Image (cartoon, rainbow, N blue to C red):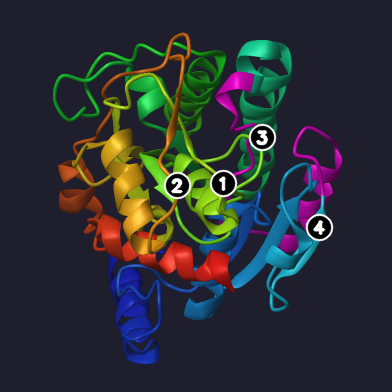
């Protein structure tokens, strides 16, 4: 599509899409999309934003951690492991213009205990996605990680900072990013990597190894004490999943690159617990446990590049996001 035709397509999209639809953007036309991991926490929110915008969406998931109830009825579903040949058939059927690649092994502790399995999903699985996308001329928007890639932060991390992962999970995500960049150089593609902060929101599993917000609010809902590892002064950049979905959609159609997606604000675990307890209307005091080996003390992201290039910035405050998440847990 030439520049004139592309501009016309954007004007047509702007005329057809009402601005109150979540995920609406005049810079992204309607697309045929695949969402890998679309039955998971973040993937289901990305799917919802695409459907609300009127896109044609196929969800790919093997349900290792995703839930069938997270798959919207309007989306097509292909029960596929991205490491298998079935991935190619799903791409053949969907003919996607964009693949939002969110399928992952996302548990840092599992990556330490089973690094080969982690690499199988997060590295080899991503290579399989890139190959399927190459055959169909599909752009890939890849969900990466900020904290696990940058390591300790003395200030908000920027994209050009040294990448110093301290876990196999972070190393695998960084390796996958490098594959995206290599394909861009080799084939002239425009794949994009998004380095997320600590994502929280509705549908995040509060049981087992999950995000700390889901764990805290889940325990508060049950009336059981929350556990804080170490002194609780370690900080993270907590970003609401609805904002993550907007950033993910905004990355489609870009000319490649790597972007941080966070708030730029660091919040300690102690402060997070108190704010969770506030939205829950009280609860027992937290219990302290020994610090976990290798846990980062400070991690937060500078997302000004995403604001300049993607037109994105976080809009949901921590307290607002916590209230929405609490309401979803209490339903």
| Picture residue at 31% right of the left edge, 68% below the top | 27
- Sort mark 2 into few (<14), some (14-19) or many (20+) by Cα contacts within 10 Å: few
Residue at left 42%, top 72%?
29
**Residue 329: percent from the left, percent from the top?**
56, 64
Among the two numbered marks 3 and 2 on one chain, the one whose residue lies closer to the N terminus: 3
Q: How far is mark 3 from mark 4, CA to CA?
A: 18 Å
Marks 3, 4: nearer the viewer: 4
Rounded to the nearest angstrom, the CA distance separating label 3 from label 1 is: 47 Å
Which residue does the numbered mark 4 point to in the structure image? Answer: 78
Relative side of 273 to 31, left or right: left
Element under disc 1? loop
In the rendered structure, which segment of residues is drawn in magenta?
A: 80-109
Any mark on residue 131, and which? 3
Q: Which residue position is annotated with label 2? A: 284
**In this rendering, the label closer to the viewer, 3 or 1:** 1
Task: Name the residue: 62% across, 23% down.
Answer: 123
Disc 1 from disc 2: Cα separation: 7 Å
Q: Nearer the viewer, residue 48 or 134?
A: 48
Between residues 162 and 109, which one lies in front from this camera angle? Answer: 109
- First reached walking from the N terminus: tag 3 or tag 1: 3
Disc 2 is placed on an element classified as loop
Element type where label 3 sits in the image? helix
Residue 98 among those drawn in magenta: yes
> Quick check: 169 left or right of 252?
right
- Mark 2 and mark 1 in contact (Cβ < 8 Å)? yes
The quadrant in which residue 153 appears is top left
**Which quadrant, please, contains the N terminus?**
bottom left
């Amino acid at each position: 599509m030439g520049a004139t035709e592309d501009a016309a397509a954007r004007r047509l999209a702007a005329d057809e899409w009402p601005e109150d639809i979540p995920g609406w953007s005049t810079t992204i036309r309607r697309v045929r999309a695949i969402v890998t991991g679309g039955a998971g926490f973040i993937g289901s929110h990305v799917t919802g934003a695409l459907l609300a915008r009127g896109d044609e969406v196929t969800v790919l998931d093997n349900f290792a951690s995703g839930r069938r109830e997270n798959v919207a009825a309007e989306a097509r579903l292909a029960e596929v492991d991205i490491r298998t040949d079935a991935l190619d058939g799903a791409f053949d059927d969907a003919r996607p213009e964009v693949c939002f690649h969110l399928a992952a092994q996302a548990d840092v502790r599992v990556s330490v205990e089973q690094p080969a399995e982690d690499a199988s999903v997060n590295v080899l699985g991503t290579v399989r996605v890139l190959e399927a996308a190459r055959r169909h001329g599909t752009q890939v928007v890849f969900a990466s990680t900020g904290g696990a890639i940058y390591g300790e932060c003395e200030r908000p991390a920027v994209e050009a900072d040294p990448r110093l992962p301290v876990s196999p999970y972070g190393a695998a995500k960084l390796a996958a990013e490098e594959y995206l960049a290599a394909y861009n150089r080799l084939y002239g593609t425009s794949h994009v990597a998004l380095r997320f902060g600590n994502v929280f929101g509705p549908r995040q599993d509060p049981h087992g190894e999950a995000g700390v917000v889901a764990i805290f609010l889940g325990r508060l809902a049950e009336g059981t004490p929350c556990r804080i590892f170490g002194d609780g002064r370690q900080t993270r950049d907590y970003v609401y999943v609805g904002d993550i979905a907007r950033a993910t959609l905004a990355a489609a159609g870009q000319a490649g690159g790597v972007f941080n997606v966070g708030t730029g604000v660091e919040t300690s675990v102690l402060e997070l617990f108190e704010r969770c307890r506030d939205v829950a209307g009280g609860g027992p005091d937290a219990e302290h446990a020994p610090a976990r080996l290798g846990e980062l003390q400070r991690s937060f992201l500078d997302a000004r590049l995403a604001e300049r290039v993607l037109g994105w910035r976080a809009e949901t405050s921590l307290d607002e996001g916590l209230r929405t998440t609490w309401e979803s847990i209490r339903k």
